[in-house]
Image (cartoon, helix red, strand yellow):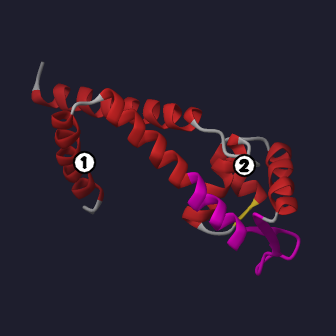
Amino acid sequence: MTDEEDTLRTAQRLRLVVDRLRRVVRQAGFVEGLTRTEEATLSRLERVGPLTTAELADRERLRSQTMGTVVRSLVESGFARKTPDSTDRRREQVHITPAGLAMMVSVNELRDRDLATLLERELSAQQRSQLAETLSWLENLGHRK
């Protein structure tokens, strides 16, 4: 195998491991009052800011009607709000509310605790130390342009 093939295989393994870990952590703890889809939608709004329902549907790979139901539920729960789009009054922007941000703090804390428990249970202290060092390298990669 060439260095290029090794690097490609490593990149594929990394992507798959990150995806698998994300699923394991999401399955570990249920957040009272939120479906998985609502959690993912709030998370996206927290990360990227206001989006239309159609944009959310596209980014979450859902039908517009399905996302409309999700958004309606989030609005009714007080986790999101809608405002008219500044460039097209026929459309509405969906925003995360302070209650939605507070919910995401709780969700993230739960997910972090679940992952920490998994790391403690499955990895030795030396392995956790090696993982921390590897994460430093990956964080540096993420900051490069």
Front residue of 73/30: it is 30
Residue 122 placement, left or right of 52: left
Q: Is residue 43 left or right of residue 122?
A: right
The residue drawn where x is 11% and y is 24% is 2
**Amino acid on which the number 1 mark rests in the picture:** Leu
For residue 39, the mark is none
* Cα–Cα span, label 1 and label 2: 29 Å
Quadrant in which residue 27 is drawn: top right
Q: Specify start and end residues of the magenta stretch as a single range.
A: 79-107
In the displayed structure, 77 sits above or below 117; it is below
Q: Residue at x 34, y 35 (%)?
A: 119
Label 1: element kind = helix
What is the number of the mark on residue 135? Answer: 1
Between 130 and 145, the residue placed more toward the observer is 130
The residue that label 2 is drawn on is 38
Q: Quadrant of residue 88?
A: bottom right
Q: Which residue is drawn at 43% across and 40% down?
A: 115
* Residue 34 sits above or below residue 26 on the image: below
Quadrant for the C terminus, please.
Answer: bottom left
